[in-house]
Amino acid sequence: MAEYLFLIGLSGAGRSTAAATLEDRDWFVIDNLPPTLLGKVAELANQPGSEYERICLVAGRGGYEGIAELPKAIAALRSSGARVRIVFLDAPDEVLVRRYEGTRRRHPVETESGILDAIRQERAQLADLRADADVVLETGDLNVHELRDKILEIVDRSGDGLETTVVSFGFKYGLPLDVDLVFDCRFLPNPHWVAELRPLTGLDGPVRDYVMAVPESRQLLERLDDLFALLLPAFVREGKSYLSIAIGCTGGHHRSVVLAEEIGELLRRRGFAPAVHHRDIDR
């Protein structure tokens, strides 16, 4: 049975780049397919000898009159037993405005109130699809190469079940916007204030030992493990494809890095294979 990936998002958030990346990986990419034809595509893909094993359907509001019917069509495809994933590309309004001003292209949503109003209208029109997405990929801080890497990471981590990601971050650089669960470890003593630990990171043994020597670190991990025991099987039962977990400290160098690695180990012991990233470790 064919695999389907719906690439949906705001105009200017990187749909074209993401679609080209998938096409380079031999996905069959269809742009703005009318939802009424989705069943026909599935029939063709499931015929014996079909060459279309991986199908990417790209959709956005601009010029796509079928966007209102798309959620129902996706639900029908999922009910057939096919593997279906939705990746939603998003970016802050100010980033989208800057991108449109830089290219001087016309926004596909017609409005007399300017580019910002057009972006907000499109965001409202896509709200239901964003809420149903398996992955919301925030592209505001990504360049073209980083966006391609993110898309490939999503599609190349194939397999059934729940795919997990753990990311450490620094609150001083802002919350990550494309995560499901966020935890705060700033209540722990900060290695930044220990002179010999300051230039190191949470990937270094002395910093890890310092953080894990604090009883509250172990207690936090024990409680998170209890929480994961409840949440992870429930997410799997509900058919969730991706779960992203973030943990933050002040700068994203020490405490959160140590605990992100430890959370990754908790997930591995529960049978998952998490990808662990440290967003701000080099800042």
Image: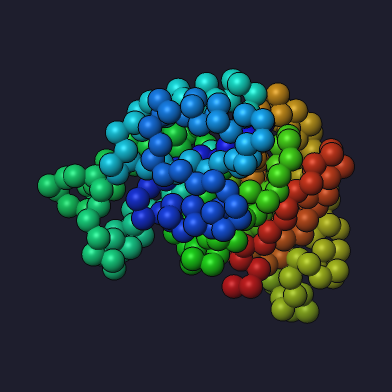
Q: Is residue 40 left or right of residue 80?
A: left
**Foreground: 62 or 237?**
62
Residue 98, x across and y down, in percent? 31, 63
Residue 220, x across and y down, in percent? 76, 44
The structure residue drawn at horizontal position 47% and vertical position 63%, both measured from the top left corner, is: 141
**Foreground: 82 or 242?**
82
Vertical position of residue 74 compared to residue 89: above or below: above
The structure residue drawn at horizontal position 50% and vertical position 31%, both measured from the top left corner, is: 41
The structure residue drawn at horizontal position 29% and vertical position 44%, both measured from the top left corner, is: 62
Q: Is residue 187 left or right of residue 174?
A: right
Looking at the rendered image, the quarter that the N terminus falls into is top right
Residue 64, x across and y down, in percent? 32, 38
Q: Is residue 99 left or right of residue 106?
A: right
Using the rendered image of the protein, determine whether residue 10 is visible from the camera's viewpoint: yes
- How many numbered marks appear? 0
Q: How is the image coloured?
A: rainbow
The structure residue drawn at horizontal position 49% and vertical position 57%, both measured from the top left corner, is: 20
- The single residue placed furthest to the left in the displayed view is 112
Looking at the rendered image, the quarter that the C terminus falls into is bottom right
Q: Quarter of the image holding residue 101?
A: bottom left
Q: Quarter of the image holding residue 223?
A: top right
Q: Is residue 191 left or right of residue 252?
A: right
**Foreground: 153 or 123?**
153
Residue 210, x across and y down, in percent? 82, 64
